[in-house]
Amino acid sequence: MTPAPGSGFEARPHALYLAAGASRRFGGDKLRQPVGGRPLAAHAAAVIAEAIALGTLGGGVLIVPGGAAAIDLQLDSFGMDIVTSPDPARGFSASLRLGLVALERTRAGAALVALADQPLLRLEIIDRLVRHWRATGRSVRPRYGDAPGIPGHPVLLDRSAWRLVEQVEGDGGLGSILKRQRELIEEIDVPGDNPDVDTPDDLRRLEERP
């Protein structure tokens, strides 16, 4: 099931890549931290850029803080439209709204909401989510086999569900809302995991992984 003929929407999602967090729990700008020779934020962005190049995604919007952040994070060459968040301290919800407003101007039938502090994002997961959405028309998120109790990202949000973002405040994500309204999103089982890097210990564990 793809977007209905005449709806005017693409049967390809666009990415919404959130890289404007305040990094409070980390104690500093974690997205610039080097991982494997690149800033942390550049890893998942490269995977999204590959999905765009392959045609799995139709485009993308990148939310960054003000200044030269996109260049600093090595995100200026990934082909997404860059949107600057005027006040990252307003939290995750402000970035989410800002990105969806930008995507409202596109023909995207859905938004793949991806987080810059999850550098282990895999192309195969994006592909699975997109194929499920195209078959069902439903919003969908992964349930990782190595972390089944943790709500998985990225979240593929059908355009009909973008209104939910109006209920998100501060650093709250979509998780609490989707948990209360389970009928709005499906979960699919996928292997592995996709951990957040929220603290210096998280970064250390990431660097110790094989």
Image (spheres, helix red, strand yellow):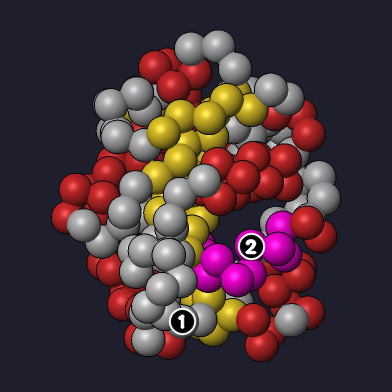
Q: Dot 1: few (<14), some (14–19), or many (≥20) neighbours within 10 Å? A: many
* Alpha carbon distance from label 1 to label 2: 14 Å
The residue that mark 2 highlights is 162
Amino acid type assigned to the residue bearing label 1 in the image: Gly
Is 168 covered by the magenta stretch? no
According to the picture, the residue beneath numbered tag 1 turns out to be 137
User: Which residue of the protein is positioned furthest toward the front in this rendering?
Assistant: 6
Q: What is the x, y in percent for residue 24? A: 72, 32
Q: Is 126 placed above or below 90 here? A: below
Q: Where does residue 184 sit, x and y in percent of width and height? A: 64, 81
Q: Is residue 104 above or below residue 41?
A: below
Q: Which residues are magenta?
A: 153-165
Left or right: where 167 falls relative to 200: right
Q: In terms of image quadrants, where is residue 133?
A: bottom left
Q: Is residue 30 above or below residue 187?
A: above
When asked about the image quadrant of residue 135, the answer is bottom left
- What residue lies at 49% left-to-right and 59% top-to-bottom? 111
* Residue 132 lies in quadrant: bottom left
Residue type indicated by callout 2 = Trp
In the displayed structure, 25 sits above or below 128; it is above
User: Which of the two residues, 26 or 46, is positioned nearer the viewer here?
Assistant: 46
For the residue pair 181 and 189, the one nearer the viewer reads as 181
Mark identifier at residue 62: none
5 on left or right of 31: left
Helix, strand or loop at label 2? It is: helix
* Residue at image point 29% right, 33% down: 78
The first of marks 1 and 2 along the sequence is 1
Residue beneath the point at 48% across and 12% down: 68
Q: Position of residue 113 (x, y in %)?
A: 51, 55
Kindly tell me whether residue 96 is visible in this rendering: yes
- Any part of residue 145 in sight: no
Please tell me whether mark 1 sits on a helix, a strand or a loop.
loop
